[in-house]
Image (cartoon, rainbow, N blue to C red):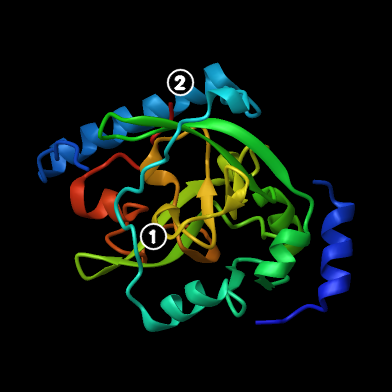
């Protein structure tokens, strides 16, 4: 891992611009049908929405009075708790995997990057929604700085929380990774992210359901496939509960 000089990294990046679903049968036939249906859903969504189709954005007057936490609402790890108490002075976000220029960014680095602010609706698979104002750098800026290799097909988000004895993770493809509304959020409604909402960093992938919005993010890993990750399905809930990997809305 290479720690880049903060000034040169930020200058270079600035120059670049800116819970449960029913589980299907475990039989091979059922899995084959599931995969085919999911691929068809994804293809139709992409054809309709287009590569740069935007999720709706709202006014500040439309923000929800509260934004509930869901899934993990705390991280019991002692290092995390010490960082939370001190405002995350030593928290670092890594960008690694199939990249030519691995990155390690502090929270100060993240806040110093060009920022995007967007007010969007969070839709949970459990049936509730909330509108919040999110702020953070576009993921695409970090990927450009890290120089993602051509062989990378997905991004895996490594998280600090643990559920049911498993490390939490999620993933997206490169279309959503470079979408202009895909940001690494550090603020909610003008304030630093609360612990229940994923402090200090969470993903906002606005065209997908809430379980894709990984919280407590500590690393972003570019990979060619999910074969050696979890159960090979691309995410925590995909592994343990049979959720679809692509959760477009």
Q: State which tag comes first along the sequence, 1 or 2.
A: 2
Left/right placement of residue 110 relative to residue 17 reads left
Q: Residue 210: which numbered mark, if any?
A: none
Q: Secondary structure at mark 2?
A: helix
The mark tally for this picture is: 2
Q: Quarter holding the C terminus?
A: top left
Whether tag 1 and tag 2 are in contact, CB under 8 A, the answer is no
Residue 3 vertical placement versus 211 (above, below): below
Q: Give the residue drawn at x 27%, y 50%.
A: 237
Q: Give the residue drawn at x 78%, y 78%.
A: 4
Left/right placement of residue 203 relative to residue 78 reads right
Q: Give the residue drawn at x 55%, y 77%.
A: 86
**Could you classify mark 2 by the number of other residues whose Cα lies within 10 Å: few (under 14), some (14-19), or many (20 or more)?**
few
Q: Is residue 121 visible?
A: yes
Q: Measuring from the top left, give residue 113's x and y in whole percent.
A: 77, 57
What residue would you read off at disc 2? Answer: 44
Spatial separation of the CA atoms under disc 1 and disc 2: 26 Å
Q: Measuring from the top left, give residue 132's x and y in whole percent.
A: 52, 36
Q: Measuring from the top left, give residue 82's x and y in whole percent.
A: 46, 81
Q: Could you say which is closer to the camera, residue 191 or residue 30?
A: 191
Q: Measuring from the top left, give residue 7's x and y in whole percent.
A: 87, 72
Q: Could you say which is closer to the camera, residue 175 or residue 217?
A: 217
Q: Secondary structure at mark 1?
A: strand
Can you tell which quarter of the image residue 225 is in? Answer: bottom left
Residue 109 vertical placement versus 171 (above, below): below
Q: Residue 169: which numbered mark, if any?
A: 1
Residue 80 vertical placement versus 123 (above, below): below
Q: Give the residue drawn at x 66%, y 28%.
A: 52
């Amino acid at each position: 891992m290479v720690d880049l000089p903060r000034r040169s990294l930020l200058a270079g990046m600035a120059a670049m611009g800116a819970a449960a679903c029913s589980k299907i049968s475990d039989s091979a036939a059922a899995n084959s049908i599931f995969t085919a249906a999911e691929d068809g859903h994804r293809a139709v969504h992409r054809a309709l929405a287009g590569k740069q189709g935007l999720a709706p954005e709202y006014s500040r007057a439309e923000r929800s009075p509260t934004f509930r936490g869901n899934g993990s609402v705390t991280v019991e790890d002692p290092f995390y708790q010490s960082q939370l108490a001190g405002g995350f002075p030593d928290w670092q976000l890594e960008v690694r995997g199939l990249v030519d220029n691995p990155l390690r960014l502090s929270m100060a680095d993240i806040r110093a990057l060009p920022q995007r602010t967007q007010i969007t609706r969070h839709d949970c698979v459990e049936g509730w929604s909330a509108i919040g104002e999110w702020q953070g750098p576009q993921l695409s800026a970090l990927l450009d700085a890290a120089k993602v290799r051509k062989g990378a097909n997905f991004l895996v988000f490594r998280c600090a929380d643990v559920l049911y004895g498993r490390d939490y993770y999620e993933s997206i493809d490169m279309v959503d990774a470079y979408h202009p509304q895909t940001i690494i959020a550090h603020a909610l409604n003008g304030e630093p992210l609360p612990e229940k909402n994923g402090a200090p960093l969470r993903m906002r992938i606005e065209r997908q359901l809430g379980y894709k919005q990984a919280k407590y993010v500590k690393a972003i890993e570019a990979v060619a496939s999910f074969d050696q990750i979890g159960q090979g399905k691309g995410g925590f809930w995909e592994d343990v509960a049979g959720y679809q990997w692509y959760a477009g809305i």
